Amino acid sequence: QVHLVQSGAEVKKPGSSVKVSCQASGGTFSSYAFIWVRQAPGQGLEWMGIIKGMFGTTNYAQKFQGRLTISTDEFTSTAYMELSSLRSEDTAVYYCARAENYYGSGSYFWGQGTLVTVSS
Amino acid sequence: DTVMTQTPLSLSVTPGQPASISCKSSQSLLHSDGKTYLYWYLQKPGQSPQLLIYEVSNRFSGVPDRFSGSGSGTDFTLKISRVEAEDVGVYYCMQSLQLPFSFGQGTKLEIK
């Protein structure tokens, strides 16, 4: 039974960075891929990127290239999403989700979401 | 990139009546391993998305049998045989075959 607990809400200034954590329990952490998805207010789900299990290979959506870093800490079973150069359009709920395998294809199970508000 | 297109974007259904949502992908979601990497998620109000259907037609554990998925290749459908009040929310199809993974725009289901 997978359980994902994300860090709390953040308020950030434009131009700053935010780092959201996602602690996982249930299963061997390195055996699974994690994705990050965001949802702007009243909008749909937007896939941001993935970190695959085993070797930690990452792949990011084109629109986030250069601003997004996804990482993991196997010792604390935690995945991280760091987004830099924040702008108001980055205000959204950010979700982590865990795959059922290390390469990422398949079903996903979701954390509770973290609201990031970017405002001056 | 694979584009996922859902229709309709909203549905208003009387309890007990059926509902159907279409999802079309711009590329086939059939992998050489024989699996089709198409999933349906429901996001209830104020909640995270939850898995309903995996690999086109398999109900996830605990999902009522009034939910069914069908389709192949690029055309997929989610059906609810008899809508109940607890089914309200936004339904998303998702492909996890090709990076970047992608979602449909979402279909909002409300009860009449």
Image (tube, coloured by chain):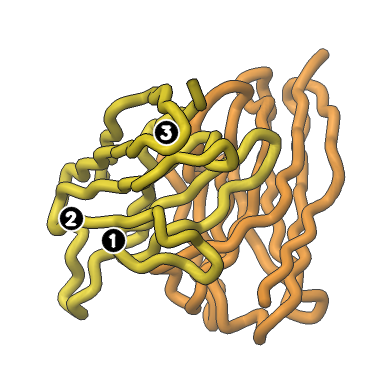
Residue position marked by numbered label 3 in the rendering:
B106
Residue position marked by numbered label 2 in the rendering:
B71
- Is residue B66 toward the left or the right of residue A97 in the image? left
Distance from label 3 to label 2 (Cα)? 18 Å
Query: Do dots 1 and 3 share one subunit?
Result: yes
Disc 3 residue type? Gly
Residue B56 has which mark?
1
Disc 2 residue type? Gly
Residue contact between numbered discs 1 and 2, judged by CB atoms under 8 Å = yes
Of labels 3 and 2, earlier in sequence is 2
Disc 1 residue type? Val
Of labels 1 and 2, earlier in sequence is 1
Q: Residue A39 location in percent, x, y? A: 58, 34
Which chain appears yellow?
Answer: B
Distance from label 1 to label 2 (Cα)? 7 Å
Question: In the rendered image of this protein, does residue B60 appear above or below residue B109?
Answer: below
Residue A78 in which image quadrant: bottom right
Q: Residue A32 location in percent, x, y? A: 56, 76
Residue A111 in which image quadrant: bottom right
- Image mark 2: chain: B
- Is residue B43 toward the left or the right of residue B17 in the image? right
Q: Nearer the viewer, residue A79 or B76?
A: B76
- Is residue A51 toward the left or the right of residue A77 in the image? left
Name the residue located 36 percent from the left edge and 25 percent from the top edge.
Answer: B9
Residue A79 in which image quadrant: bottom right
On the rendered image, what quadrant is the N terminus of chain A found in? bottom right
